[in-house]
Amino acid sequence: MTILNKTGPAVKPLLLSHFTLCTAAGCGLEENLQALKNSHSGLRANDFLDTDLDTYIGRVSGVEEQQLPTHLTRYQCRNNQLAYLALQQDNFSLAIEQAKQRYGAHRLGVFLGTSTSGILSSELLYLSEDFHHSGQLGDNAHFREHHNSFSIAEFVRNFYQLRGPAQVVSTACSSSAKVFASAARYIEAGLCDAAIVGGVDSLCLTTLYGFNSLELVAHDVCRPADINRQGLSIGEAAAFILLEKKHNHNQALAAQQTAVYLRGYGESSDAYHMSSPHPEGTGAFKAMQQAVENASMNASDIDYVNLHGTATIINDQMEDKALAQLFSKPVNCSSTKGWTGHTLGAAGGVEAIYSALCIQHNFMPESLNTRLIEPSMSQNILSKNQYTKVQNVASNSFGFGGNNCCLIFSEQTC
């Protein structure tokens, strides 16, 4: 049933039939779930290449050892290696092959988010002695397969031999949340029957030194909403979800204890500043409000909010103000970046899966590393894991330039 409201037609529920991820907290669903339940952070002192930065990072173990299939070796870069590592978890590839049989390779879309793609390969080429001496990049420069933002979608598409629509969204930290909205619109328009959504972002010099130059990187582990928070911890991750129409979910449900659906999404733009959000959370509020309305819900139906929660001073404050505008009383919420670091273009996908795990296992994670909540915070920021019924979760992702997205997930479809 489609219900009209002031933001347009309600979203038709889409099933998250299969999903998988690799983060600093672990590879695969079980390792991430246990890390969440046991409050085990994946953050560690910076040991990435020879970067001279006093900070903590969310580095995924085993990325460097990944060798892509022979016919895809031209895509060999850290970003695609990280994607390949994730695609091997949780029988995700089997699920995609089954989806191909159901729909056909031409009816399965790929919608992924990234912020820097495989830019590390370009960085290392420009820093190499060969380039220093010759000024030439040589035959090792594969800009299309590495540096190009579309590389990740092209790699996944070729890996699974798909021919459906493919798109990469690069809106900084909201990238892999916005792909859910893109895929939903494509499916609704009849351009594909199902879609692989998610995102991949890997560690590189641009993000580490770039965020440090903006004075947004913490020397300690990130502490979201903490009165003494210093800033964010940069992380890397890959997250993949298979989205399918509600009425095509019978096979997929057999593999799940609790079915989780995308119920709503909201998108907005602050148009306020290139790297700072609107201090009153105006755009963030509009994205959340739209998501709730498109899900045909009331704000009071939301059990838990997975915060964007980067642990920067302004971001945490503005998100709290936005929540106060939407909820008539404090809502249970927390940031999960204490486990993974801020995975930038992959954050929306990672936290969508974390939201699904909360629904399937009926728990709300604490805001890890938060020791003393800033007194001005108005919402119920969780200081320890809560085990209780979780039916509806809102997940926030806010990118540079005030590019905002909110996703709502639920075990209920109507």
Image (cartoon, helix red, strand yellow):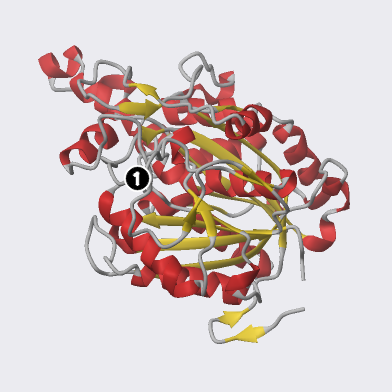
| Image x and y of residue 263, in percent | 66, 65
Q: Amino acid at mark 1?
A: Asp
Quadrant of image for the N terminus: bottom right
Is 399 displayed left or right of 22 in the figure? left
> Along the line of sight, which residue is nearer the eye, 39 or 54?
39
Q: Residues within 10 Å of mark 1 (few under 14, many from 20)?
A: many
Q: Tag 1's secondary structure?
A: loop
Q: Relative to residue 250, is residue 302 depicted above or below?
A: below
Instruction: Please name the residue that numbered disc 1 is placed on.
Output: 226
Residue 160: percent from the left, percent from the top? 66, 36
* Image quadrant occupied by the C terminus: bottom right
Q: Is residue 358 visible?
A: yes
Q: Residue 369 versus residue 146: which sits nearer the camera?
A: 369
Is 130 located above or below residue 378 in the figure? Answer: above
Give coordinates of residue 72: x percent, y percent.
54, 26
Q: Number of numbered discs present?
A: 1
Q: Quadrant of residue 202?
A: top left
